[in-house]
Image (cartoon, grey):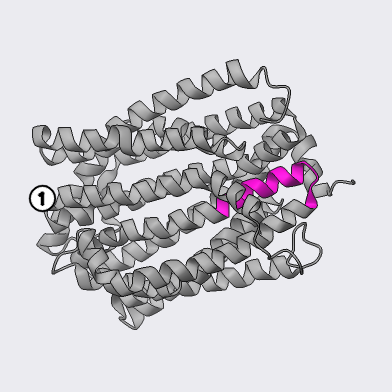
């Protein structure tokens, strides 16, 4: 079968230029996602107050659950589609697209229907107090109502990138970011809709992004496009999608549990302002992590496609190039965080009142402690996503659970009683150090003992 020119690039173009071509749009797209979360937080912190900022930290576990579902379907579909395209199996690639559409919509409706009736009890379980419950509820209610739309947008955007359109996937996220910034200014600052306005700005932005993505899949010239006969669900395809999407899904689901754990400890040691500080720190730290995730998203279709071809040399090459680029990003982030934390935190907090000033002080101190081993995180993120891209979900799951459960939870149990509130923040640094070393050992053994001997697709 004659290969599409877009797909031929994945097997022939020089690797450095190819990774840059795929990663740059993904980096810009992931940075755009992070920026519109940051913009929401800035508007909330400055115009809704410190307790609203704490409420945003309370909803983080529930947001993580929705992201977990999105990665289960979206990243699972993307990886399977790129491997199918590499093998020249267009029928299976189209079936994956159909499953992505159907599972995204059905799952989004189901998750919203399950969560909305129990939203207040869930937020109380996640650590909401009398002061933070209402702002958290106002934001999350609107967000959950729009979840079927936002889930479909993100899932199909992942698949767009995997099928050879990284630049268009970037543009959809940039469009969404710009709409979110404009809507946040209008709804929160101009119309004073508070947290309801913040949630509505997010949903409107993702709805506009969905219009762009939908237009792509309606074009018959796209490598994969919507057509009849691809929407009937198949158990083998669903299992393949979920097997590959399970590692990032579990990572986000476990992250939900961890954030609840963090919030409960911060409430005990530092009160609502400690929880708010954690929300600020999360947004700053996640910006750099999202850039690294952009690099890995550029890596994934290249690795998956060349794995399907059996071209292991290119698979190895794209991994190491992605690792070096990611390490440089995390090092730059570490230098900024350690060198000018008060400038970064000051963007989110209006310190004219005592509560906001205390929140800023806690965030500065906590961020420095939490990011001691920040540059090493690149190893854990890239290795985990690499195993997902080449269809080794079990290894990816093990690495992710090591960081989030096997190391972090014991650290959270042991360090705070001995070090006080500093132990809460330091626990993440300990988990980053141990899990990154483990990831480095695992990928070294894989390349030297398994990958080298392989004479068939892994």
In the rendered image, residue 116, in percent from the top left (x then y), is placed at 35, 73
Instruction: Using residue 285 as the reference point, say whether residue 450 is left or right of it.
Output: right
The residue nearer to you, when weighing 371 against 263, is 263
The residue sitting at the front extreme is: 235
Element type where label 1 sits in the image: helix
Q: Is residue 80 left or right of residue 139?
A: right
For image coordinates 73% across by 26% down, the residue present is: 456
Instruction: Count every numbered label the image shows and give the total.
Output: 1
Question: 319 or 367: nearer the eye?
Answer: 319
Q: Position of residue 168 (x, y in %)?
A: 66, 59
* Residue 319, above or below 241: above
The stretch of residues the image draws in magenta is 74-90
Q: Is residue 328 visible?
A: yes
Q: Is residue 295 left or right of residue 228?
A: left
Residue sitting at the far bottom:
191
The residue pinned by badge 1 equals 268
- 261 lies above or below 405: below
């Amino acid at each position: 079968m004659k290969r599409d020119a877009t797909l031929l690039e994945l097997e022939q173009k020089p690797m450095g230029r190819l990774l840059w071509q795929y990663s740059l749009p993904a980096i810009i797209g992931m940075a755009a996602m992070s920026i519109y979360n940051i913009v929401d937080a800035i508007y909330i912190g400055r115009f809704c107050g410190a307790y609203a900022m704490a409420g945003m930290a309370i909803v983080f576990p529930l947001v993580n659950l929705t992201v977990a579902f999105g990665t289960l379907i979206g990243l699972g579909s993307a990886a399977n589609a790129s491997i199918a395209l590499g093998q020249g199996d267009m029928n299976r690639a189209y079936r994956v697209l159909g499953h992505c559409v159907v599972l995204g919509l059905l799952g989004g409706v189901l998750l919203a229907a399950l969560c909305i009736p129990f939203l207040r009890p869930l937020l109380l379980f996640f650590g909401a107090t009398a002061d933070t419950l209402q702002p958290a509820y106002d934001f999350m209610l609107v967000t959950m109502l729009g979840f079927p739309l936002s889930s479909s947008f993100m899932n199909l955007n992942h698949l767009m990138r995997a099928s050879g359109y990284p630049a268009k996937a970037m543009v959809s996220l940039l469009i969404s970011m710009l709409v979110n910034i404009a809507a946040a200014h209008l709804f929160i600052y101009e119309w004073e809709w508070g947290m309801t306005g913040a949630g509505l700005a997010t949903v409107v932005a993702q709805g506009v992004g969905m219009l762009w993505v939908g237009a792509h899949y309606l074009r018959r010239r796209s490598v994969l496009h919507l057509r009849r006969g691809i929407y009937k669900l198949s158990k083998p395809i669903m299992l393949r999608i979920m097997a590959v999407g399970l590692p990032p899904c579990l990572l986000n689901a476990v992250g939900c549990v961890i954030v609840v754990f963090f919030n409960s400890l911060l409430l005990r040691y530092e009160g609502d302002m400690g929880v708010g500080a954690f929300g600020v720190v999360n947004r700053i730290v996640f910006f750099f992590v999202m850039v690294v995730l952009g690099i890995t998203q550029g890596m994934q279709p290249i690795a998956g496609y060349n794995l399907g071809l059996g071209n292991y040399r290119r698979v190895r090459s794209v991994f190491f190039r992605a690792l070096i680029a990611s390490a440089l990003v995390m090092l730059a982030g570490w230098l900024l965080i350690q060198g000018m934390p008060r400038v970064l935190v000051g963007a989110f907090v209006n310190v004219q009142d005592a509560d906001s000033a205390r929140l800023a002080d806690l965030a500065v101190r906590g961020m420095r402690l939490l990011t001691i081993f920040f540059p090493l995180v690149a190893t854990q993120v890239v290795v985990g996503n690499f195993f997902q891209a080449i269809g080794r979900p079990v290894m990816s799951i093990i690495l992710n659970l090591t960081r989030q459960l096997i190391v972090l939870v014991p650290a959270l149990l042991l360090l705070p009683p001995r070090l006080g509130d500093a132990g809460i923040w330091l626990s993440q640094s300990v988990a980053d150090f141990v899990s990154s070393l483990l990831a480095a050992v695992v990928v070294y053994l894989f390349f030297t003992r398994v990958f080298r001997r392989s004479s068939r697709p892994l």
